[in-house]
Image (spheres, rainbow, N blue to C red):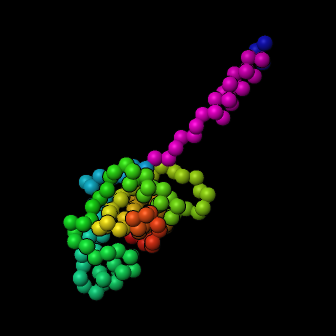
């Protein structure tokens, strides 16, 4: 009788595991007060407002518009964070890689660009900054 009870207990556990939905990934956007957000924000502002030849070349290479500092912001809206997370994941992982939860820095530049960073995602010692357009199409990635 004990073996039958174990069998049904194991079967119930298996059925519960199969029928339970998998935990979905979550994307958390850091606030503007976060150190990672401040560093990336300042770097982006420097690039998009700079008028020297190096800033102009960098801005062009990163496909960022020239805008006033007031048009650059750290974004924490849940819907933007989800879109940024989905796009970032697709940009930094091979196709078919299961989504993972991420903490993100999302910088909006004007009305047409986003720069996204997962401070925990690295290529060697470098962080992956990804530039997307307003439709979350990958434009370019750069490390920093």
Quadrant holding the N terminus: top right
Image spot of residue 14 (x, y percent)? 68, 30
Q: Does residue 12 belong to the magenta stretch?
A: yes
* Rendered residue at 30%/83% (across/down): 56
Q: 72 and 124: which one is in front? A: 72
Numbered label tally: 0
* Rendered residue at 36%/52% (across/down): 29
Q: Does residue 55 belong to the magenta stretch?
A: no
Outermost residue, top side: 1
**Figure check: 2 above or below 141:** above
Image spot of residue 122 (x, y percent)? 47, 63
* Rendered residue at 31%/56% (across/down): 75
Q: Is residue 137 left or right of residue 63?
A: right
**Figure check: 138 above or below 103:** below
Q: Is residue 19 left or right of residue 115?
A: right
Q: Is residue 20 left or right of residue 62?
A: right
Residue bounds of the magenta highlight: 4-26
Q: Is residue 115 visible?
A: no
What's the magenta bit mostly, secondary-structure-wise? helix
Image spot of residue 93 (x, y percent)? 55, 62
Q: 3 and 26: which one is in front? A: 26
Quadrant holding the C terminus: bottom left
**Figure check: 11 above or below 41:** above
Image spot of residue 9 (x, y percent)? 69, 21
Q: Is residue 12 visible?
A: yes
């Amino acid at each position: 009788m004990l073996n039958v009870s174990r069998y049904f207990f194991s079967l119930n556990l298996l059925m519960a595991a199969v029928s339970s939905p998998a935990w979905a990934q979550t994307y958390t956007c850091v606030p503007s007060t976060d150190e990672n957000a401040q560093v990336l924000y300042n770097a982006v502002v420097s690039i998009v407002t700079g008028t020297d030849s190096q800033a102009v070349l960098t801005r062009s290479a990163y496909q960022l518009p020239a805008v006033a500092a007031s048009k650059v912001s750290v974004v924490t809206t849940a819907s933007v964070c989800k879109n940024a997370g989905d796009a970032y994941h697709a940009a930094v992982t091979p196709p078919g890689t299961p989504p993972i939860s991420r903490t993100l820095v999302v910088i909006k530049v004007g009305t047409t660009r986003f720069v996204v960073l997962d401070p925990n995602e690295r290529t060697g010692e470098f962080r992956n900054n990804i530039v997307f357009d307003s439709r979350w199409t990958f434009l370019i990635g750069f490390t920093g």
